[in-house]
Image (cartoon, rainbow, N blue to C red):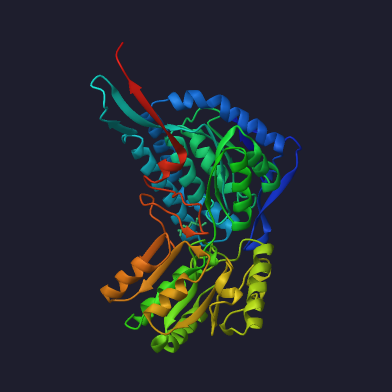
Amino acid sequence: MPQQYKNYIDGQWTDASNHAQTHDINPANTREELGTFPSATREDARRAIDAAQRAFSNWARTPMPKRGEILDKAANWLEARVDEVGAALTREEGKTFVEGKAEVARGVSILRFFAGECLQPTGDVYPSASASTFLFAERVPLGVVGLITPWNFPCAIPTWKMAPALAYGNTIVFKPAEITPLTAWYIVSAFEQAGLPPGVLNLVVGRGSQAGQELVENSKVKAISFTGSNEVGTRLAATVAQRGGKSQLELGGKNPIVVLNDADISRAVELTIQGAMLSTGQKCTATSRAIVVRDVANEYRDALAARVKQLRVGDGMQSDVYMGPLVSADAEKTVLEYIEIGKNEGARLVTGGEKLRGEEYAHGFFVAPTVFDNVTPDMRIAQEEIFGPVVGVIQAKDIDDAIALANHTRFGLSASVVTRDLNLALRFMREIEAGIVHVNSMTAGAEPQAPFGGFKESSSGTREQGKAAREFFTQWKTVYVDPL
Ligand code: UN1
């Protein structure tokens, strides 16, 4: 009998009001169930919002260093369980155990970074035109915030929203993706064990259309931070704006790796594979276009195909596996559809392109790592986010053409260039329309102390992580103090 998990509202683990349950399934082996979880209703979300609202004034008044201590304790709790939580993450999401553990370790670093931020200045003192006036501006919390997070980074993304939200004095209703609730349960447990007061962090596991929609529509929720699809994100932002709330969106990407003439081809291939195939391509920062200057295009394509064919696909808990399954049957269906679209558009399938068969793959959502060649810039596979282990090679005439092609997308999250030529790297850094630029590293990856987010339709303009996170989770209060 799999364990039955609950929502966490006002410091209590509670069943959903409708007693409905969802099953948390391993995408590498659908016969394995990791637990049953509630399917929260709007009513449950309302209770969580009310609890967060009641907890707000005490939490906002709790000294910031004390808030930092709680973040630090939560970090310690998670750090002591990196293997356990990493394995849970791998078993419910599918990425390899190496990646699962690395993600939990990243969650720990994020919590520690924001614990440190709790000792940083919270505002500025200004010179006043009046000799007697003490004039300062302080960053103060917003109130109740809603965090709606995706399944692809079930530890890193919730912690990078939660840590600043809590550090700056907000209270939270957290709605994780309904298909990765176990990692969410661990994160909330870390805060419970760290002594976070009841109501400060509430967990509602359920569907976006129920619990999520309540967060979006309820005017007690002052701000929503969302990572997910463009379709959901833009609708969400419109609804939140209409009721005067604030929203932050981290959405899709169509991230290029640009390979220039002088690149070390085997290094370029390695970076492409890391960016495109780790986490089975299910990152908004994943590499999905390889834009290669034509003099080296054939050499690069052949080397890429040869390496991709060697990648071991399987259950991410096995130590020799490089790439796990897709997260769900829906995800698998979408990726296979895009592969058909690519073929029909006239792209050439170089390797992969099919669902993997055989005993090892019989109970999971395994698709072969896939490379397309002869991709042209306006094909759907060159424009739409596939969110799977698929990369398309596009040829460029020269660096000008390569940068123009790289920018030829509605997205602008991350981009990478492979070159030893400093002048060309500098041009790329200046001209690329992307929030995150890599020179000689893969398109994915984000360190907690640096701002994270995209240009164009990849984000709503604010940045997550680092000191930049304060911008979204606080508001200015400007104070003029005069003697009487
Ligand atoms: C990373 O590249 O390691 O949903 C982080 C995503 C991004 C996070 C990427 N928001 O994939």
Residue lying furthest front: 129
Q: Residue sitting at 44 percent across and 50 percent down?
A: 463
User: Between 462 and 440, which is closer to the camera in this rendering?
Assistant: 462
Vertical position of residue 141 compared to residue 298: above or below: above
Residue 439 position within the rendered picture, expressed as x and y whole percent measured from the top left: 34, 68
Q: Would residue 67 be seen by someone viewing this image from the given angle? A: yes
Q: Quadrant of residue 369?
A: bottom right
In this rendering, the count of numbered labels is: 0
Q: Quadrant of residue 205?
A: top right
In the image, taking residue 471 as reference, residue 332 lies left or right, namely right
Vertical position of residue 176 compared to residue 385: above or below: above
Q: Residue sitting at 49 percent across and 81 percent down?
A: 394
User: Between 292 and 7, which is closer to the camera in this rendering?
Assistant: 292
Q: Quadrant of residue 358?
A: bottom right
Residue 380 position within the rendered picture, expressed as x and y whole percent measured from the top left: 61, 74
User: Between 130 and 17, which is closer to the camera in this rendering?
Assistant: 130
